[in-house]
């Protein structure tokens, strides 16, 4: 089993080397980058927005209901919502959601191309298929997904604010004071960095799974599942490592 | 011209190709025929470099594929057009995009020149008014034609066709075969067709290699295939009722 894991790891790095080889035609790669940015990042805006709005609202209710001690200022509700959103939700939770949405999309797309010989056709033309098909996906996700993290953060706060406004669970002034209290700009960088790293993991691992798919449509389905499971586990593992390294 | 010299290929313990020797001539429809599982697809994959042989050599116009550097292999690949069994058209782009794809990557032509070349190739295979359709919107026969148009876009010296008639009705099969033969003669290229379609062999087989059990069991052309005494070839050919009737008529 260890042998198999090491072989897979080695194959993954060889695959990455192939992905980042010198492009045959930079202009076509840039064009593909824009296509992938639309497909992988901008098409995820709606789901990220909806989830963030609702989670922000839920967080404020849960935090307020757990802070009933009269000696604790209610502004801490806003503070805790902000910290929860920026430290964990907007990067890790959104990345886990994207692992399902984007990861399965990448793995099944490349897997289908593999079993219908489209990748072979590209290789036979002398095109680095891994470079052309995978590199724009990795770059688009890694560079642009931190924008989704920022959007998620802002909409999470907006959702929380809306719930406070509609339910009156705490005073609006306390909430606003809380979300501006002890602001640490480094947390934004930390969260954006995590999102970037997780996006690299999602796109590269899913592409690796899909690119080497075999065994017909069942094989593609299996590889899509592997992609989601492997990406999710790696996201959690690297969340722990990065948090230890950057925050402690 | 492509020469195959003493080619061997095995997978684990199974010998799939055993001492294959063949010469595929320029300007001819060269065919590799045989039953399913005889090793003809493995032979084709070795020829185009998707598989590496265990032993032996493949020589493209005097240059050994086995000893070729990675850079030269890439250059060779630009001179190879391939029609895959399932057409292998790119789902992410249109008919025109598929034919433009190799031109976009490898030609220095201006956009208008590339467009003109792609339109010429599509016209040559009788695809009209379908520039903006996606592969999923095309019939099997149209997909094959677009596959041929893409394969010839860069003016290749070698054309490989893996079972070009599979999944097509007899009439469309004849049209595709005719098209491949016309293009072979017009462009004077080396065409290698992997097939078990009897009509293709009898109509267009200028140079036929019959593969059985991983070896070349017979070599000849369309004129000699029905009169051969080779028992294995006879068994293969007689599986087709029309060919069987012709052979039985000859024997009477």
Image (cartoon, coloured by chain):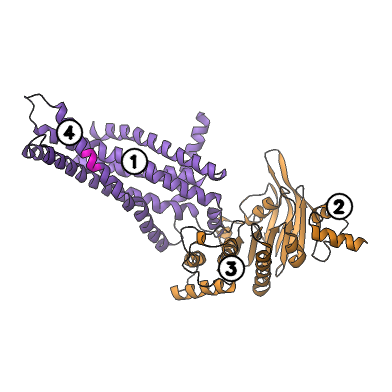
Chain colours: A purple, B orange
Packing grade of label 3 (10 A; few <14, some 14-19, many >=20) is many
Q: Which mark is residue B152?
A: 3
Q: Which residue is mark 1?
A: A97
In this view, the residue in front, B42 or A217, is A217
Element type where label 1 sits in the image: helix
Q: CA distance from mark 1 to mark 2?
A: 63 Å
Check the residue under mark 1 and report the chain it is in: A
Q: Which residue is mark 2?
A: B231
Instruction: Give percent across and percent down for residue A16.
Output: 45, 46
C-alpha span from label 3 to label 4: 65 Å
Residue B114 image position (x, y, % from top left): 48, 72
Is A183 situated left or right of B64 in this image?
Answer: left
Asked if the residue under mark 3 is in contact with the one under mark 1, i.e. CB atoms within 8 Å, the reply is no
Tag 1: Cα neighbours inside 10 Å, few (<14), some, or many (≥20)? some
Query: In the rendered image of this protein, does residue B140 appear above or below residue A164?
Result: below
Residue tagged by mark 4? A61
| Local secondary structure at mark 4 | helix
| Image depth: mark 4 or mark 1 in front | 4
Mark 2 residue element:
helix
Is residue B62 among what the camera can see? no
């Amino acid at each position: 089993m260890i042998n198999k894991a090491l072989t897979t790891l080695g194959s993954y790095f060889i695959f990455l080397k192939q992905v980042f080889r010198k492009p045959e035609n930079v202009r076509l790669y840039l064009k593909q980058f824009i296509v992938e940015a639309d497909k992988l990042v901008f098409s995820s805006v709606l789901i990220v927005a909806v989830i963030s709005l609702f989670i922000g609202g839920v967080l404020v209710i849960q935090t307020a209901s757990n802070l009933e001690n009269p000696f604790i200022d209610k502004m801490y509700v806003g503070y805790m919502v902000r910290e929860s959103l920026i430290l964990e939700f907007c990067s890790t939770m959104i990345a886990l959601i994207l692992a399902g949405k984007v990861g399965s999309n990448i793995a099944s797309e490349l897997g289908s191309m593999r079993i219908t010989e489209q990748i072979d056709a590209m290789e036979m033309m002398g095109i680095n298929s891994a470079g052309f098909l995978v590199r724009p996906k990795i770059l688009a996700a890694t560079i642009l997904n931190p924008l989704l993290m920022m959007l998620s953060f802002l909409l999470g706060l907006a959702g929380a604010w809306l719930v406070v406004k509609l339910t009156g669970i705490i005073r609006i002034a306390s909430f606003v004071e809380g979300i501006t209290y002890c602001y640490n700009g480094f947390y934004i960088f930390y969260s954006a960095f995590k999102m970037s790293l997780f996006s690299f993991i999602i796109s590269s691992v899913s592409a690796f799974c899909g690119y080497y798919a075999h065994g017909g449509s069942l094989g593609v389905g299996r590889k899509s599942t592997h992609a989601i499971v492997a990406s999710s586990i790696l996201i959690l593992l690297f969340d722990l490592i990065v948090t230890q390294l950057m925050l402690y | 011209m492509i020469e195959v010299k003493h080619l061997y290929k095995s997978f684990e313990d199974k010998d799939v190709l055993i001492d294959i020797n063949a010469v595929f001539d320029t300007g001819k429809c060269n065919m590799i025929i045989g039953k399913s599982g005889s090793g003809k697809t493995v032979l084709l994959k070795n020829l185009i470099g998707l598989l590496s042989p265990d032993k032996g050599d493949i020589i493209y116009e005097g240059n050994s594929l086995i000893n070729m550097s990675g850079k030269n292999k890439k250059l060779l690949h630009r001179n190879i057009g391939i029609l895959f069994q399932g057409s292998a058209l790119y789902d992410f782009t249109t008919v025109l995009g598929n034919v433009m794809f190799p031109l976009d990557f490898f030609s220095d032509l201006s956009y208008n020149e590339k467009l003109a070349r792609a339109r010429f190739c599509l016209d040559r295979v009788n695809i009209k008014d379908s520039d903006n359709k996606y592969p999923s919107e095309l019939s099997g026969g149209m997909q094959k034609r677009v596959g041929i148009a893409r394969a010839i876009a860069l003016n290749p010296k070698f054309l490989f066709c893996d079972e070009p008639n599979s999944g097509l009705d007899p009439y469309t099969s004849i049209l595709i075969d005719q098209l491949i033969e016309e293009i072979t003669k017009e462009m004077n290229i080396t065409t290698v067709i992997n097939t078990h379609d009897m009509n293709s062999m009898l109509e267009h087989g200028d140079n036929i290699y019959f593969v059985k059990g991983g070896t070349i069991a017979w070599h000849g052309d369309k004129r000699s295939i029905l009169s051969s005494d080779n028992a294995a070839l006879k068994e293969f050919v007689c599986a087709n009722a029309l060919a069987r009737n012709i052979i039985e008529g000859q024997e009477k």
